[in-house]
Amino acid sequence: MPFLPSPETSQKSITCFKGNILAVDDTPANLHLLSEVLSKQGYKVRITPNGKLAIQSILANPPDLILLDIMMPDMNGYEVCKILKADERTRDIPIIFISALSETFDIVKTFKVGGVDYISKPFHVEEVLARVENQLRLRSQARQLAEQNARLYQEIEQRQQVEEALRQSQAREREKAIQLELTLKELKRTQAQLIITAKMSSLGRILAGVAQEINHPVALILDKIKPATDYLRSLKQSVEYYQNNYPNLAKEIQDAIEYYKWESVIKDWEKLMVSIEVGAKRIQQIVESLKLFSRLDEAELKTVDIHESIDDALLILQHRLRNREIEAIKEYGELPPVACYANQLNQVLVHLLNNAIDALETQSYPGKIRISTSVVRGEELAIANNSHLVPREVEPPGSRSQVEPGNENEKPPGSRSQVEPGNEKEKNDRIAIRIADNGPGMTEEVQKKIFDPFFTTKPVGSGTGLGLSISHQIVVEKHRGQIRCVSAPGQGTELIVEIPV
């Protein structure tokens, strides 16, 4: 018999629905028995006599589980199983093979083609029910697991979206914070610059007043030098006249002439008057430079000689150069007149020279500052000359770039020559001003920050950290130029300013 009923099973009848089962067998008696037993246990059972009808029924209404015979005409159970497993719509339906084939090869083949279990004929009711219930439970658990996975995947996706939104929000907030920090830094720089500008403006007015007050007595001294010299010459001539015409002067007069060393006094007096004149003219030069730098609030463009501006800046800082025994070497090229905001550019030159002097304060070797100028043509780049940065001997006397210590204001011959007529400037031509020192130099990290507002390497209280920042703004924003730094530890520093011609 293909079916062995159990006394306990035959007495039980369960009416609740437990699942949809399709039984496929070419023996009607087997189909009837399976349908009766499973229906009593609460399963909804459909039956088909062959493989083709089974496939049609499954595609029309997929069951929860399939009980499939192997040996059937036209299409055996293996073929039906392969077709179902190849179809995405039916591949997940569990298939339990029921067959009289008991060879190991046949049983193994059922699992290879996609079956989940195998029941041998004749089968026991309890075995069929247990295996059916087990597979339906596994299928239910698989569905629940799939649903949980889907929900979990959805939750993960939603959480990822929330996290991404949070990251984007944090990135926006960071960007806002950065912008706020930059704005605050710019505001501080602007406020500091306004304060410095106000101080410089007040200082300018004071300098203008001081220069005017100094100028009057200096002019008076210079004005009186010639009469004083003439009076001395007349007095000298008078004494010589008496000495020549009246050789037998009274003894008292002759003794007085010898006592007061008349001849030495006359010689020293002449030298003294020359020294007074040189000193007074020097004061006049300083006064003129002070008057120039006192007009820092002038806003109009002016055509200036850059070399004169450099000379004036050196004159203003000459006391610092002398006190530290720093040699200023000028290497002036041939420059055309440049339209610029003259007094602001003067401020830049003073800042750069002051920084070079500061860099040389603590050095044990002789300090040197080399100021060179040239015209940069077209798209050519003003390349720093590293030979300017290292300590080296000054060129032999007579060299065009040689400047005697203390005579930094003297201009090398030919330094004022202009571009010859007909040699018109090319588009994008710039003048380059290089200020190099043989100080300790800077690291790359420091070079990246030197133009930042309030950045300074000087001790607390020794600098505001605004000199180079303001210089950068004046050169780049006001003059559409550029300012660059070339430096290396132990190799000195060179600052290059380029301004369009």
Image: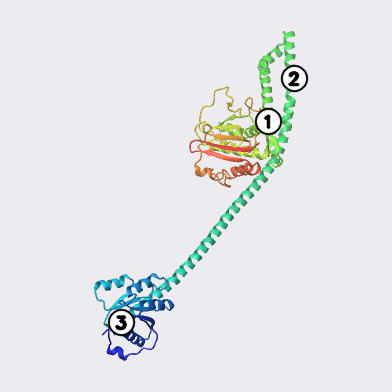
Residue that numbered label 1 is attached to = 285
Disc 2 to disc 3, C-alpha distance: 145 Å
Q: Quadrant of the C terminus?
A: top right
Mark 2 and mark 3 lie on one chain; the one further toward the N terminus is: 3
- Residue 298's x, y, as percent? 71, 41
Q: What element carries label 1?
A: helix
Q: Quadrant of the N terminus?
A: bottom left
* For residue 498, side relative to residue 138 (left or right): right
| Residue found at the very far left of the displayed protein | 103
392 shown above or below 73 = above
Q: What element carries label 2?
A: helix
- Residue 43's x, y, as percent? 37, 84
* For residue 220, side relative to residue 477 (left or right): right
Residue that numbered label 2 is attached to = 230
Please name the colour scheme applied to the rendered image. rainbow
Disc 1 to disc 3, C-alpha distance: 120 Å
Q: Do the residues labelled 2 and 1 touch (CB within 8 Å)?
A: no
Residue that numbered label 3 is attached to = 128
Looking at the image, is mark 2 or mark 1 nearer the viewer? 1
262 shown above or below 44 = above
For the residue carrying disc 3, how many other residues have a C-alpha within 10 Å: few (<14), some (14-19), or many (20+)? Answer: many
Looking at the image, is mark 1 or mark 3 nearer the viewer? 3
Q: What element carries label 3?
A: helix
> Based on the displayed image, in which of its 4 quarters is residue 139 positioned?
bottom left
Residue in the foreground of this view, choosing between 193 and 22: 22
